[in-house]
Image: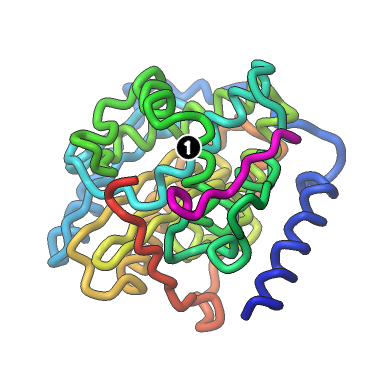
Amino acid sequence: MVSITRLAVLLLVLSLTAGPAVAGSNMPVTGGLSHQPLQNIDYSPLKKQMKKFVHGKKSTFAIYFEDLASGASFGINADKPMVAASTVKLPMALYINDLVVQGKMHWYDRVSYRKATDYEDGSGVLRYEARDGDTYSLRLLTNLAITISDNVAFRMLARHVGRSNFYAYMKGLGGHTVYPGGKNLTTARDLAIYVKAALDFARRHPQEGQRLLDDLAHPSFHVGLPGLLPHQVMVAHKEGDLEGIANDCGVVFGRRPYILVVLSSGVKDVREGFADIARLSRMAYDFQESLPAAEIFPVYQSPVNVSVKPLPPARCRVVQSERLAKRW
């Protein structure tokens, strides 16, 4: 196991030096938005379809949807506090990127591992590899926290930037449910705010933003929002799971891009929980495909409407429970 994890870390380090895997030298740019008037887009059929689906489930769902072309949005339990699990790693990665572009930190800065405060069971490789005093670059820790949802990397980043500073950052973005009582809780609406902030960051800082979106689009856990979508449709997202919890939040770069957040609790089988998220995501995708296209991020968007084949069994993951504590 140790030799395998060391190899995994080495491969990740090598991938970092290669840069983001996006064709050409193009950076994400904001294209012309759709001229479809907001009042002419009726999302009530999609909302009704989603409500009918979740109503038949024993799990509790919180959903937020936003069309990035028109700004139309809706929520289902969108302000209900839910366990965030590893979705909280998305705003953390955004915070680190923001600090780097401000010159307050650098990607080459190194953070020392402290087992007493940083160790966390569950997802990741650093729990096998790290020893007291080992140092890791800020870039590597941020990459690991997103691409393989490394719990130790996240805790090291949280200690490095300061928990109170991180909380203040999320509130500054517009988050309302930010670690109430020290518990890792959030809402679907708050996570959508963080996703939209990441897109805004990519517009203002194309180079760093491209790398952030690229990390979010190529994680090891990739079965929630993208689970039933065409493989060529880019989905930049962050999943999170615990026992009884299955969450995903992100942006789908289809012909008409949109943000979708699905949080669920009381899930009997986490694999089935993510399958439900994939079904809800497919509903949103199909609805968006029926609307006029809107070129917003042309580098990332799918150019054509592609038919979908049934999801092959090979794409189903065996979920590794992250066991992310509700408190740091």
Q: What residue sits right under mark 1 in the picture?
A: 159
Residue 283 vs residue 166, the one in the foreground: 166
Residue 116 x %, y %: 44, 52
Residue 133 x %, y %: 63, 50
**Which residue corresponds to the image point at 40% horizontal and 31% vertical from the top-left?**
163
Left or right, residue 162 beside residue 211: left
Quarter of the image with the N terminus in it: bottom right
Query: Which color scheme did the rendering employ for the protein?
Result: rainbow
Residue 196 vs residue 182, the one in the foreground: 182
**Which residue corresponds to the image point at 77% horizontal and 49% vertical from the top-left?**
16
**Residue farthest bottom in this picture:** 313
Circle 1: residue type:
Arg
**Which residue corresponds to the image point at 21% horizontal and 34% vertical from the top-left?**
180
Quarter of the image with the C terminus in it: top left
Visible residue check, residue 303 = no
Residue 207 x %, y %: 75, 29
Visible residue check, residue 104 = yes
**Which residue corresponds to the image point at 64% horizontal and 33% vertical from the top-left?**
297
Q: Is residue 112 magenta?
A: yes
Residue 231 vs residue 15, the one in the foreground: 15
Residue 152 vs residue 24, the one in the foreground: 152
Left or right, residue 176 beside residue 59: right
Helix, strand or loop for disc 1: helix
Q: Is residue 275 above or below residue 91?
A: below
Examine the image and state in which quarter residue 178 appears.
Answer: top left
Examine the image and state in which quarter residue 283 appears.
Answer: bottom left
* Numbered range of the magenta stretch: 108-118
Q: Residues within 10 Å of mark 1 (few under 14, many from 20)?
A: some
Q: Is residue 99 above or below residue 238?
A: above
Q: Is residue 66 magenta?
A: no
Residue 174 x %, y %: 35, 21
